[in-house]
Image (spheres, coloured by chain):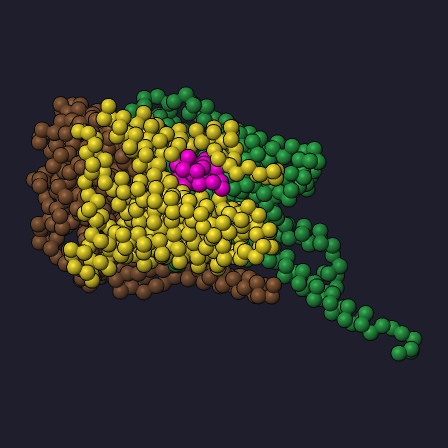
Chain colours: A green, B yellow, C brown
Amino acid sequence: MQWMSRLPRRAWLLIGYAAAAAALFSAPLYLNDFRLNLLAKCLAFAIVALGLDLLWGYTGILSLGHGVFFGLGAYAMAMHLKLAAGGSRIPDFMGWMGLTKLPWFWEPFKSFAFAAAMGLILPSALALLLGFFTFRNRIRGVYFTILTQALVIITVTLFVGQQAYTGGTNGLTGYTKLFGYSLTSGTAKTMAYLATAAALLAAFAVCRYLVNSRFGKVLRAIRDGENRTRFLGYDPAYYQMAVFAVSAGLAGLAGMLFVLHVGIISPTMMAIVPSIELVLLVAIGGRGTLIGAVIGAILLTQAKSQLSASYPDFWLFLLGALFIVVTVFMPGGIVGLIRQARQAILRRRSENEITLDSIVPKSNGVV
Amino acid sequence: MEIWISQLFNGLSVSSILLLIALGLAVTFGLMRVINMAHGEFIMIGAYGAYMTQQIFKSTLPKSLFDAYFPVALLASFVLAFAIGYLLEVTLIRFLYGRPLDSLLATWGVGLMLQQLARTIFGAPNVAVSSPTWLDGGWALIPGVVLPYKRLFIIALVAFCLFAMYLYIYRSNAGRRMRAVMQNRDMAACLGISTRRVDAFTFAIGSGIAGIAGCALTLIGPIGPSIGTYYIVDAFMVVVLGGVGKLVGTVAGALGIGVFNTLFEWWTDASLGKVLVFLCIVAFLQWKPMGMFAVRSRSLDG
Amino acid sequence: MRKVGWLKGFAMVLAASLVLAGCGGDKNNEAGGASATGSPSASESGAAASGDKIKVGILHSLSGTMSISEVTVKNSELMAIKEINAKGGVLGKQIEAVVEDGASDWPTFAEKARKLLSEDKVATVFGGWTSASRKAMLPVFEELNGLLWYPVQYEGMESSPNIFYTGATTNQQIVPSIDFLLEQGKKKVFLLGSDYVFPRTANKIIKAQLAANGGETVAEEYTPLGHTDYTTIIAKIKEAKPDVVYNTLNGDSNVAFFKQLKDAGITSADLMTVSVSIAEEEVKGIGAEYLTGHLVAWDYFQTTDTPENKVFVESFKKEYGEDSVTSDPMEAGYVAVYLWAAAVEKAGSFEVDKVKEAAKGIEFNAPEGKVTIDGDNQHIYKTVRIGEIKEDGQIVELWNSGGPVKPDPYLATYEWAKGLSE
């Protein structure tokens, strides 16, 4: 099998990616409805994880509030779906709260294009705003993280309180149609799944491009030494704002797709605990590596679904232990472990080679 | 008129509770730059410590002695939280110095495990703690304004803890070592101070104060596995607002948030009040990014 | 570094083995005497009735914040299943419960509901607690034509063809309690609630009812879920001087509120409160000394005086411990299982449409009194009760509606409610 080791690493990577893409796209053929739905959820979380990885793994900014951006994208899509399901009547929860006609800011969501655009733009705009008020004042590190938690509380409280406009804690649910097609049919679900898989691949491609570009290099410079980057003439604040906005946009995209599969969005999904679990996805997979984010997201979401079924009482213990183990012992995540393993194998192999060749030199007889 | 006085007292009382919760966090965060997301769970540990003390008193001692359980509970909560904090520091936090973001995540995991542990041991529903009878009732300042003894007690407790911390940090040898390690770890180590021991002790003290807070909170609030989550974000806000490294900053932060929260809540409602307070904090941080009373140093990173 | 590497490897192996174990054993279940079977067979159609067993699903939050309330409902449902199995099961088959955990997370509820219906092929599901969990499950049940029995009091305004509601709707809990207060001469009402859908919707109804009947809404205050500082609210209450506080706070907020109310020197003699989210279980967590004399509105108390209730309470205590208490939602879950069994026996089949048809008008002698399924809206007739909390933590009935009240989730029969629903 000597030709296998002669192939450049690049070729292996491409083969790996092609195989993964093929597996993803052919999933509807061999997975039943329930499992396909679950996989679609995993893929949506993978998109958020990609954005978080850009922010945390490559720029060193930890945001514990990405649930907000995820939720904003989800609400945008949910508003459109709710209006599509209701036809010309106003949504049911509005009627119970005493509204007689649709509020003005709900009107434009009747158009899918507007809703989709809002799902991307709204989170990014909010991120830009928050970034403007924090990064430019050199608020970073732990302080920034705590501020993102404050953002979560503010948003959740507002969404819960404005029940007439947002559905409150019941959230938005009861969707039936998209583009006029029924959402409950098998083909609609398959289409939604394929759309999610395509979005993931697109997001991955965009992230990889960003990371390999000059922008990505500056990001890594900011992560490794923000002051030095500043001394070199770059203004880290703008780069931080930009990457924050990009990651928020990705989270919004994921939210939009998530809502298609799950059928409900409520403020609890934007809250502190889900936001922190999003970070765990990246931590487990491997921060600073894009594929790690995807792997971590898929693995953890599947594990959560399986394990909370088998061990409901112990699931929280496991989750906590996972947090601890991953941050203390496996900072590189699963991908990091694989890399270390491979390096160890390579080192051992090259050690063997050294032992054979260099210790016993080929001499011409003089001992 | 009565409203003003009672609301002023309410603001003071809320501030005192915030201070009690945030004091431990200020110690660990301020002096060691370790974010302890499990701080809320230490409060929960203190609350359950009070519960267990109460159960022991109920089952083994005569009824007349029951009221004495509370001082014992305070001590027990402190010791319990201190021990668990010490254990935590030695086994986990030690590896995380210099990595604040990682310590955040790891301690969040610890918090989850502690919560689930409490659920397994005590059950998920809330447990009831009866407050001692000598704290019942209130002080009728003027007709119409009743200042509950429990809240006065908490204010006194906070003042006592603050004083004790001040004495410890600024007037004792151990405190001097703590300040030395905080200001320049390497130099302190060169001078022969065991930074490991100082760190462990500091973290344990911070956790112990959280335990006391938990015990005091049984007087006025629920006792269950998830009560830590109610207080953790407020505690962080106090520390971030007040500035890291000085006790007076924490006091100022707690006062500011407590009074403004009560004010806003009176004008609007509880939800909106909280939102407004947080917005004000973000606005304030624009002006002073390092908090109200920050320790200034020459280094660029503050 | 060797040591750390070894530790890492061990951690990986542990994690991997757990994941594999989780993948392999797909379900867990604890039923009164049933064993675990984990085989999702996609080829079966209809309910998974294999041999002499029939599967039903139980979907509650067994972990997370809502588990406080839901675990006891799961327990009473399991007890009902055990009792029915002991009497020979339903249609000759033993009931096997597949228990799933909603984990206080609404998408998880939807996901587990889908799993129960499409993979485990259960005949029916008993579950849900918050309205959000029910609303998350609703589309799944309507899409897959499943059957859900929802045992909790809620805000009404819903009657899905695939859900049977055995908990009280608003006209079986809130509306009669307001009538009771007005009769007692308490006209000025201070509305205090947690900020979520149930209190907001309930308060809209109460305001309309008060306005139409000569009462007055003095104030309407909401606090976020998990709020624990009520000093300002109590100050507002003192200033507003109402006759009664209608309390729709939930969970831990109730503990804080009542403790601080007593601290402020206000007892039930000074100011009456009526609560709709405090049952026997919550009284244990708050402490009866803070609640003595305050009122609650439910359809069932542990002290309810029917022969069926005596048996119910005794069996529950025997099964789950002498310290256990029974509450309204637990009883509603218990009743739901028996109602389903009765409907199946009458229909002679497990198929959802036949069971729904047969369920109309079914009566059952429940611990709360006689209940009947209302075929129009799939709710049940329930007797409304108002009780007072006593020092021993039990709730004693002060007033009841004289007989079961017909459910009216859309409040169509009330003149003053005309503007409330679409």
A163 relative to A357 in the view: left or right: left
Q: Is residue A35 magenta?
A: no
Instruction: Tell which of A355 and B248 is nearer to you.
Output: B248
Q: Residue at x 57, y 34 (%)?
A: A138
Which is the main secondary structure of the residues drawn in magenta?
A: helix
Instruction: Tell which of B124 and B261 is nearer to you.
Output: B261
Q: Position of residue B217 (x, y in %)?
A: 30, 45
Span highlighted in magenta in the image: B231-254
Instruction: Tell which of B74 and A263 is nearer to you.
Output: B74
B123 relative to C310 in the view: left or right: right
Q: Is residue A142 visible?
A: yes
Q: Is residue A303 visible?
A: no
Residue A181 falls in image quadrant:
top left
Q: Residue at x 55, y 62 (%)?
A: C8
Number of numbered discs visible in the structure rendering: 0
A111 relative to A95 in the view: left or right: right
C103 is higher (above) or lower (below) than A175? below
- Quadrant containing the N terminus of chain C is bottom right
C214 is higher (above) or lower (below) than A282? above
Q: Position of residue C422 (x, y in %)?
A: 28, 26
Q: Is residue B245 magenta?
A: yes
Q: Residue at x 32, y 32 (%)?
A: B11
Q: Residue at x 13, y 50 (%)?
A: C392
B188 relative to A212 in the view: left or right: left
Q: Position of residue A333 (x, y in %)?
A: 57, 54
Q: Position of residue C30 (x, y in %)?
A: 30, 61
